[in-house]
Image (cartoon, coloured by chain):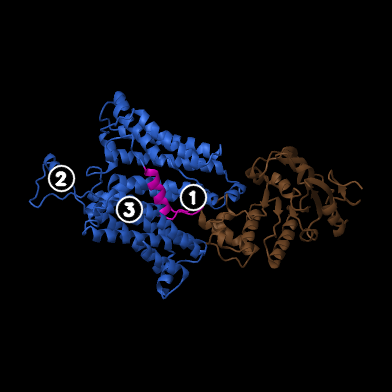
Chain colours: A blue, B brown
Amino acid sequence: MSEQAAPSLKTKSGGGGNNLIARFLAATEIDTRMLGMLGALVLVWIVFNVASGGIFLTPRNLWNLSVQTAAVSVMATGMVLVIVTRNIDLSVGSVVGFVGMVMAVTQAEILPHFVGFDFWGTWILTLIVGIGLGALIGAVQGYIIAYLRVPAFIVTLGGYLVWRGGAWWVTSGRTVAPLDSAFQLMGGGPLGSIGFLPSWIVGIIACIAIVYTVIDNRRQRLRYNFPLKPIWAEVTIGVIGCAATLAAIAVFNAYPWPHLIAEKYAAANNITVPPEGLFISSGIAVPVLMAISVAVAMNFIAGRTRFGRYVFAMGGNPEAAELAGINTRWVTMKIFILMGILCAISAAIASARLNAATNALGTLNELYVIAAAVIGGTSFSGGVGTIAGAMVGAVVMQSLQSGMVLVGIDSPLQSVVIGAVLVFAVWLDTLYRRRAE
Amino acid sequence: MLDKATPLVEMRNISLSFGGIHAVDDVSVDLYPGEVMGLLGHNGAGKSCLIKVLSGAYHRDEGTILIDGAEVTINNPRDAKAFGIETIYQTLAVADNVDAAANLFLGRELRTGWGTLDDVAMEAETRKVMGRLNPNFRRFKTPVKALSGGQRQSVAIARAIHFNARILIMDEPTAALGPQETQQVADLILQLKADGIGIFLISHDIHDVFDLADRVCVMKNGKLVGTAKTSEVTKDEVLGMIILGKCPPQAVPGPGAVTV
């Protein structure tokens, strides 16, 4: 991690003979910290790949990694806004447990009384119930924090206990399974992936969006005669963005369904299995698609809406924001409502993946979510943080975790390493900030 | 000027206390269009508190506020802005981590037809305003944190004047500035005054205020010592008001005036 982040420190201060790189970064306006983070991620991947004898960087492992990251990364995007406004949410893991349990009971025990089993809309109704409940929990916590002025740390510490207890209480500790068959798709798996062609279509749509964004930005700046980036810089960014997207799709499509499932599918659909085996691409997993959609939506909210602007202004100087006429309490409450909604989405992914809701669902998630946001460059002193950074932070966390499992590191040592990396990453970030000023 | 029938702002018998301490005690002050009213007093005399009542940052305990002769309710900064009251705070109240355009439009963002932030339009407006105010200003994309005190102050002033303020409150606007920037602010005040804007200029330093103000109003220990036209009193007499609370005969005495 250190080796990769170090060059980004250097280029920022303009030291050494990296003049060309410095000019490239200046022209493309690429965030050097983000670059450092991606560098760290690549380093982690390479180290684990070597240590595991080449298992880490296989389509299968990367596909699994993407599914494992989904639940935490959904919440990490919301945690960025929470921490940016100098708050904290310790309750997210417990909210996942409680909402997950309520959603499980809704689809497995309540709804069947009214609509019967295998009703096509069960998953939608369940998700509506879950998101509504998540928003309500967020609203209650947010109200206490914003209007009753109880510190977020205390309110969500209370929430941590309340909702975990609630998860237990709903079914008296009984595990609820199995879940609705359509709901299960949100957990991934062979059927919970969108397949070969749809994956490429998603990839191509993403590429079109990237190119459109680049062109639209340029056109906007042209309209007001603002200074423009050089054309080659724009093209480079567009090409890198599209190439990365398509590469990811190629990796997801290179992971086939497991043999038995593929053969069962072939038998059911009268497809003759060729002698070398049937290759059915998984493509993007549904939870991953959900996480990416959430990230895009949250990025939009953070960067392009008034609400997002207020969140960052409040984080930088709460008093100034208040004096500028921003209703800071209402904005704070909205942040927690949003966080609650994201917890519900995460709960859907986590319980669907397990095909069950247990009262331990989401345990320790609050720490992973906070760690992901912080590794992703969100500052506890407020005002600084990005959604994209939090996503990368979540991937880094998950890579460390599943990489260590793959390499065969003992469970207690895993916690030690992750804890140390968290502290180290934040220290590195503090150094970077001090240099940048 | 005083023969104009209704003042722009009239604050009557304002009181404000914090836990038994009377920060502002029965103070009345008024302001006419195109007038600069200097608000003077020692540190802790209650000037900033009085003015924060008008800008909506504090809620008064007693008293009434009239704008254009009509009584109004100001409960928060949004209410004040709706009446055209803009404030430039002593503490350079800018959001440090966003850029000049975001600060200029904070709370009043320009939006596109889709309801999203129109950053480019906001940057264009900001470039226009700053071009008039501070032509040397170039750093439109950097967070305000990285700017110098003068640059930050010009952002704060730009924010106040861009939205057709009718009443401008400047709380020690030059406290953080160098001599050249102070002169710029003085020129700006005269320009705004010519546009018919009423200005409250707050300072603990008489020299900042005396040449610019039409009238001065002196506070001491939360009480009003008196109000005087700068054309009718000398600096020494005003100093006597500030330091001793002694009101000269040309001035209108307030409840805080020392009876000799």
Q: Given the image, on which type of amino acid does mark 2 rest?
A: Ala
Subunit that carries the residue with mark 3: A
Q: Is residue B163 visible?
A: yes
Q: Given the image, on which type of amino acid does mark 3 rest?
A: Ile
Residue closer to the observer: A160 or B11: A160
Q: Which x, y percent locates residue A130? A: 38, 35
Front label number (3 vs 1): 1
Tell me the magenta residue range. Answer: A364-386
Q: Is residue A127 visible?
A: no
The structure residue drawn at horizontal position 39% and vertical position 31%, both measured from the top left corner, is A166
Residue closer to the observer: B165 or A65: A65
Same chain for the residues under marks 2 and 1 in the image: yes
Q: Which x, y percent locates residue B52? A: 69, 46
Q: Which x, y percent locates residue B186? A: 73, 62
Marks 2/1: CA distance?
46 Å
Subunit that carries the residue with mark 1: A
Badge 1: residue crowd in 10 Å (few <14, some 14–19, many ≥20) = many
Same chain for the residues under marks 3 and 1 in the image: yes
First in residue order: circle 2 vs circle 3: 3
Vertical relation: A214 (above or below) B217: below
SS at circle 1: helix
| Circle 2 residue | A262
Numbered badge on residue A205: 3
Q: Given the image, on which type of amino acid does mark 1 rest?
A: Val
Numbered badge on residue A84: 1
Let me know if residue B15 is in the magenta part.
Answer: no
Residues at discs 3 and 1 in contact (Cβ within 8 Å): no
First in residue order: circle 2 vs circle 1: 1
